[in-house]
Image (cartoon, rainbow, N blue to C red):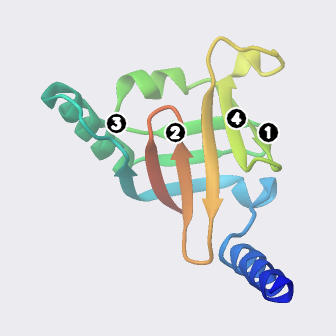
Amino acid sequence: MIMTLKFTLLFLVMCATSFSQNINELELTGTWKVEDVTTNFSNVSKEQQQYIDTLKAAFNDATFEFKKDGHFNIDIDLEDISQQMKNAFWRFDPSKLKVTVVDWTEKEADKPSWEWPITISKTEEKTLFLLMESQFNLQVTKN
């Protein structure tokens, strides 16, 4: 019984590591095109759904650029997001597979005035940018 449990746990660990891959800062650097957008919203009003649909359409045509020098750009057809990200800085936490985007002038601040967290999920088939605050999952490909 204990031996079966050990083999089952070993099998699960091996499966998890074979289906999920890490990404490093060098691989992340560059331009990423959004290929598909999914959301996890339920029980929202008609007005909220319209806003979600607008965001979804804008993200579906977006590109993310992570430059080697730390600059971050997003090409998106939403003026408020586009303006906020014009002077942005990105940093990567490989232990959490998380990118945090902040204003360039606050890149050294412990608590910047705003942060945009993006969690990276990568499998053999696809890479996802999970936008934590908005619950959008973006399937992306590197250009």
CA gap, disc 2 to disc 3? 10 Å
Question: In percent of the image, x 65 and y 11: which residue is there?
Answer: 113
Three-letter residue code for mark 1: Asp
Q: Residue 19 or 30: which is nearer the viewer?
A: 19
Which residue: 47% across, 22% down? 83
Quadrant in the rendering for residue 6: bottom right
Can residue 143 be spotted in the picture?
Answer: no
Circles 1 and 4 in contact, beta carbons < 8 Å: yes
The alpha-carbon separation of the residues under discs 4 and 2 comes to: 10 Å
- Tag on residue 71? 4
Identify the mark nearer the N-term, 1 or 3.
1
**Mark 2 highlights which residue?**
74
Report the amino acid beneath label 4.
His
In depth, the one of 126 and 64 nearer the eye is 126
Image x and y of residue 11, in percent: 75, 84
Q: Which residue is mark 3?
A: 77
Residue placed furthest toward the top: 113
If you read the primary sequence from the N terminus, does the residue marked by circle 2 or circle 1 appear first? 1
